[in-house]
Image: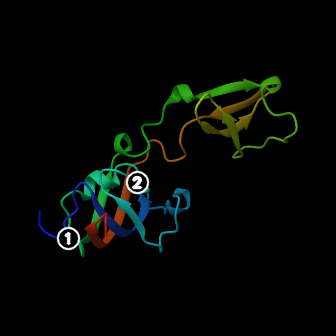
Amino acid sequence: MIPGTIARGQAVTLLYTVRDDADGSPLDDWLKHPADEPIRYVHGQEDAGLPGLAPALQGMQAGDRGKLTIPPVLAFGEHRPELVFEAVRENLPDNIALEPGQRLYSRGEQNVFQLKVVRLTEKGAILDGNHPLAGRTLCVQYQILQVDNAED
């Protein structure tokens, strides 16, 4: 392996920003970190903070920069119509005044998941359980700052 090359077990430090490939709108607000702060992860063992990003960086080197396109299937998945449904008012929180765009959180057996209120109905509300970035192709501008042994 060439020193400074991204491979399994290497610690990678990089910067990246994300835009919607269709309209160029910035999507960094949906990410877990500010775009101007470097992220560090262990390649092949940890998430790079964005699904589909780490595999696309395999074999690149410190100092590399460029643009990647990550399709929905490798990012946050396709938009799934079956996750958009009507919930009756009795099954919605009674202590919250619901409004379109609002996020509700529900606990499953293993995870907490979010639902977006799409619109209110006579019976309750239309909810969308898709990830906010589902169905979007992501355009990622990246700069690889450092690649070294994870043990260092």
Looking at this view, is 76 or 39 the one in front?
39
Q: In the displayed image of the protein, which residue is found farthest to the left? A: 1
Asked which secondary structure carries label 2, the reply is loop
Colouring mode (rainbow / by chain / secondary structure / one colour): rainbow
Q: Position of residue 52 (x, y in %)?
A: 34, 49
The quarter of the picture where residue 86 lies is: top right
The residue pinned by badge 1 equals 4
Sequence-first disc among 2 and 1 = 1
Q: Is residue 8 left or right of residue 85?
A: left
Number of marks in picture = 2
Q: Is residue 89 left or right of residue 55?
A: right
Foreground tag (2 vs 1): 1
Q: Position of residue 94 (x, y in %)?
A: 86, 33
Q: Is residue 135 left or right of residue 127?
A: left
116, above or below 147, in the image: above
Name the kind of residue labelled 2 in the image. Ala
Residue 79: image tag: none
Residue 22: image tag: 2
Q: Please rate how many residues cluster around mark 1, counting C-alpha atoms within 10 Å: few if below 14, some from 14 to 19, many from 20.
A: many
**Residue in the image at 40% along x and 54% along y:** 22
**Residue in the image at 43% along x and 47% along y:** 136
The quarter of the picture where residue 10 lies is: bottom left
